Image (tube, rainbow, N blue to C red):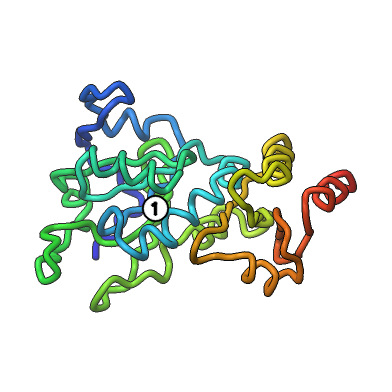
Amino acid sequence: MKNSEGQKVPQVVFKTRTPEGNWLDVSTDDVFAGKTVVVFALPGAFTPTCSSTHVPGYNALAPVFRENGVDEIVCLSVNDAFVMDAWKKDQSAEQIRFLPDGNGEFSEALGLLVDKSAIGFGKRSWRYSMLVRDGVIEKMFLEPEKPGDPFEVSDADTMLNFINPEAKTPEYISLLSRAGCPHCARAKNMLKARGLAFEEIELNDRVTTRSIEAITGKATTPQIFIGGRHIGGADDLAAFLGQK
């Protein structure tokens, strides 16, 4: 795989879509000129590692990247604009710009377009991340050339550690809830009012009250966890936030 540190990013035009459904040509300069941008590229939208780890990692740490001088985080894949837009919605990844390299022109110019015909993908991007300042590639984390789809160095934590080893990462929050639960709504409103991102796990036919009781010792909702600590219900959350 080609390492392009110290070089300018390739000049291409990305075929994107506006929220209104119109085509919009976006140039390399539109994305990178005068800005500090973190790019992470991956083999394909809706694929397991990309959806379960790569995108969520950058989305969760986006506020920390911005606190440390990054203007924008870009997810790039050799997929069309329709697929990338649908994937962004599916991932609830509003903190990230999804950029379609539909024809693989950007990936090919970087020397990172690879043949994945053996699994029916055709030509796709190799997995990597890079830090770009005003159009110049300062750092690249290229996944090792191994069979399959290695994911060892292009993750969000590795990039953030390069930018600032002392950067403070957030405490992740999970909220176990039930549809129509007023106390759950109250807890979510408290977290939103504080600007605290959280992941909601709603009870269904697979995640039942028994599971909540087995995990927390209580059968009521909501049950909130912050940074691995069991906070409790809505009143417990109010008390916890009042102490911070």
In the depicted structure, whether residue 14 falls above or below residue 203: above
Whether residue 139 is visible to the viewer of this picture, yes or no, is: yes
SS for tag 1?
Answer: strand
| Horizontal relation, residue 97 to residue 156: left or right | left
| Horizontal relation, residue 47 to residue 202: left or right | left
Kindly identify the residue that appears in the image at 55 percent across and 55 percent down: 160
Q: Quadrant of the N terminus?
A: bottom left
Q: Quadrant of residue 223?
A: bottom right
Kindly identify the residue that appears in the image at 30 percent across and 21 percent down: 20
Kindly identify the residue that appears in the image at 33 percent across and 28 percent down: 30
**Amino acid carrying mark 1 in the image:** Met
| Residue 13: percent from left, percent from top | 20, 33
In the depicted structure, whether residue 211 falls above or below residue 169: below
| Residue 87: percent from left, percent from top | 33, 46
Kindly identify the residue that appears in the image at 30 percent across and 55 percent down: 46
In the depicted structure, whether residue 12 falls above or below residue 68: above
Q: Quadrant of residue 53?
A: bottom left
In the depicted structure, whether residue 66 falls above or below residue 27: below
Residue under pointer 1: 130
Looking at the image, which residue sits at the far bottom? 147
| Residue 240: percent from left, percent from top | 85, 51
Q: Quadrant of residue 68?
A: top right
Whether residue 226 is visible to the viewer of this picture, yes or no, is: no
Mark 1 surroundings: few (<14), some (14-19) or many (≥20) residues within 10 A: many
| Residue 138: percent from left, percent from top | 42, 50
| Horizontal relation, residue 118 to residue 49: left or right | left
| Horizontal relation, residue 123 to residue 126: left or right | left
